[in-house]
Amino acid sequence: MNIPTVSMSGVPDPLPEGLHVLDVREDAEWVHGHIEGAVHVPMSELADRLDEVPDGQTLVVCKVGGRSARVAAYLLQQGRDVVNLDGGMLDWEAAGRPMVSETGQPPQVV
């Protein structure tokens, strides 16, 4: 299966209206830093929470891009319009893109 993938250089800044972000990292990763407005469904919970995945074009992210590629493949099989972010949140952070944190500390990717 050919999984649509984009690198940070191909991600518009700011994100376009109508593009959803699905973060599939675990809770401990999410609280330290994530993209504002992203939907958080850990990969391990995806099958049970599929109804929480937004309709429409969705950018799927994890820390590096491996988990999100697996999730993107699964969602493609479900007929979803998804793109995997190659390099994940590490590349997002390195590019200086905005993030938010739930810890009261500056956001970071852990």
Image (cartoon, rainbow, N blue to C red):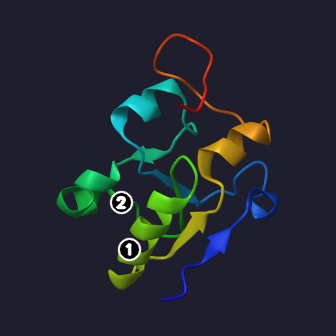
| Mark 2 residue type | Val
Work out how far the residue at label 2 is from the one at label 1, CA to CA, in angstroms: 9 Å
The quarter of the displayed image where residue 12 is located = bottom right
> At 56% from the left edge and 11% from the top edge, which residue is drawn?
105
Q: Is residue 65 above or below residue 106?
A: below
Task: Determine the residue positioned at 26% across, 62% down.
Answer: 50
Q: Secondary structure at mark 2?
A: loop
Question: Which residue does the numbered mark 1 point to in the structure image?
Answer: 75
Q: Nearer the viewer, mark 2 or mark 1?
A: 1
Image quarter of residue 25: top left
x, y (%) of residue 43? 33, 55
Q: Mark 2 or mark 1: which comes first in sequence?
A: 2
**In this image, 89 relative to 22: left or right?**
right
Disc 1 element: helix
Mark 2 vs 1: CB contact within 8 A: yes
Residue 54, position as x, y percentages in the image: 40, 60
Task: Identify the amino acid type marked 1.
Answer: Leu
Q: Residues within 10 Å of mark 1 (few under 14, many from 20)?
A: many
Q: Nearer the viewer, residue 95 or 22?
A: 95
Q: Is residue 73 left or right of residue 14?
A: left
Picture layout, residue 27 above or below residue 1: above
Q: How many marks?
A: 2
At 27% from the left edge and 58% from the top edge, which residue is drawn? 46
Q: Disc 2 designates what residue? A: 53
With respect to residue 110, does 9 lie above or below? below
